[in-house]
Amino acid sequence: MGKALIIGAGGVASVVVHKCCQNSDVFEEICIASRTIEKCEALKNKLDGDRTKIQTAQLNADNTDEVIDIIKKFEPDVVINVALPYQDLTIMDACLATGVHYVDTANYEPPDTPKFEYKWQWAYKEKFEEAGITALLGSGFDPGVTGVFTAYAQKHHFDEIHTIDIVDANAGDHGYPFATNFNPEINIREITANGRYFENGKWIETEPLAEKRVYNLPEIGPKDIYLLYHEELESLSINIKGVKKIRFWMTFSEKYLTHLHVLENVGMTSIEPIEFEGKEIIPLQFLKAVLPDPASLGPRTKGKTNIGCIIRGIKDGKPKTYYVYNVCDHEECYREVGSQAISYTTGVPAMIGAMLIMKGIWKKPGVYNVEEFDPDPFMDALNKYGLPWQENFTPTLID
Ligand code: NDP
């Protein structure tokens, strides 16, 4: 059917590449372009020879002209941005300049301000409409599948949605005292920021990790969950009409939090540059360099993830509750694609989003979040491509 340019060659990109190759009727050709060409080559060497043809390219995606050059040479139908959020705008600019569809999994965040917001990317809406191309924002798991789950609940189970609690649990154990499951810089910036949730049209801020509950998750058991701000809250608060409250919860073990607190207390999570031996360094970037590479956790990680949405609202005049979630097993993911479940649960939806655009099913000029499209084809594809979901109509609610 067509060609995809995949930007990035890290944990998530590796899953996207595997999944595109498993779906070669749609992805006849892919180009893996990233900063470190050796990582692109390693992926190509692992998968070359199947039906999907693979090219590689060295690319600094901070530079729009370099992205434009690669797009002009490779002529993709869609660009799947699985580099870092800092590259979102330069890649969107390149897509506009060349008339190519765009998909990502994380919203733009300026490197010097840990404040992720959709405003920068939503500002491209008119330009994408005029160019006749689609930008699909946040097509990972959270954001991504959580928005699709909510849209599915809205379409099939509710007349009105009143509350949404997104619960992201990772009961995986990689055996290291401390490591992050995806890019450490992005991960730690997210966790050390203030918590925030939406209630009755307002945003309520909390101290970092100040709100804690215990939730008994299917196939995982009881876990400590902490309230965080997460980017899909912003788009869902606008796109789910009438919603009164949306919160996002993530599990952290005591061991993880103890390490994090120590690192914070000694200044290692700071993004303020410091002078070190005559050179300017950013402590958080230095920390990233000494922590295990998330891509190396795959072979060591055992256990499961469970991510889903617990929703309350009204159907046919009566109160209704609904919980829709996916359980993913780290070791099964590793056996299938050589990555742990965090990369897997992000890479599969990125491939699905790109596929739906290429097939014309989710193609609509403009800039959109996933919940703005018909959820049904995405939900079907989740079952088909490795992220089957389950439903519970009597879930325990979070107070
Ligand atoms: P990694 O750090 O493993 O990979 C990032 C890749 O991008 C690396 O290959 C890196 O190159 C490359 N890269 C970084 N900067 C540039 C640049 N300027 N030009 C070209 N390539 C560049 O991260 P992950 O794979 O874990 O995460 C990828 C994305 O997925 C992130 O945006 C993350 O926020 C998002 N994500 C989304 C989730 C969701 O559910 N929605 C969940 C998890 C992650 P190099 O190899 O040289 O470092």
Image (cartoon, helix red, strand yellow):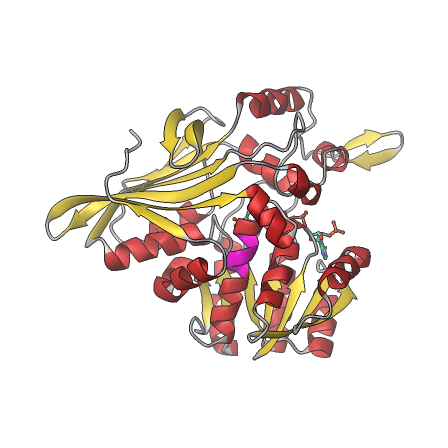
Q: Identify which residue is drawn at 64% across, 19% down.
A: 262
Q: Is residue 60 visible?
A: no
Q: Residue at x 77, y 62 (%)?
A: 45
Image-quadrant location for residue 44: bottom right
Q: Position of residue 349 (x, y in %)?
A: 50, 58
Q: Residue 335: x percent and y percent? A: 62, 49
In the depicted view, which residue is nearer to us: 351 or 199? 351
Q: Is residue 388 above or below residue 198?
A: below
Residue at image position (31%, 47%) is 391
The C terminus, quarter of image: top left
**Viewer-proximal residue, 320 or 42?**
42
Rendered position, 164 above or below 171: below
Q: How many marks?
A: 0
| Residue 159 found in image quarter | bottom left
**Residue 136 vs residue 163: left or right?**
right
Position above or below: 247 against 348 = above
Query: Is 347 a magenta residue?
Result: yes
Q: Position of residue 22 (x, y in %)?
A: 59, 66
Where's the N terminus, which quadrant?
bottom right
Residue 164 vertical position relative to residue 125 in the rendered view, above or below: above
Q: Which residues are magenta?
A: 346-350
Q: Is residue 349 visible?
A: yes
Percent from the top left, x then y, of residue 291? 72, 33
Between 316 and 231, the one lying in front of the other is: 316
> Which secondary structure class fits the magenta region best?
helix
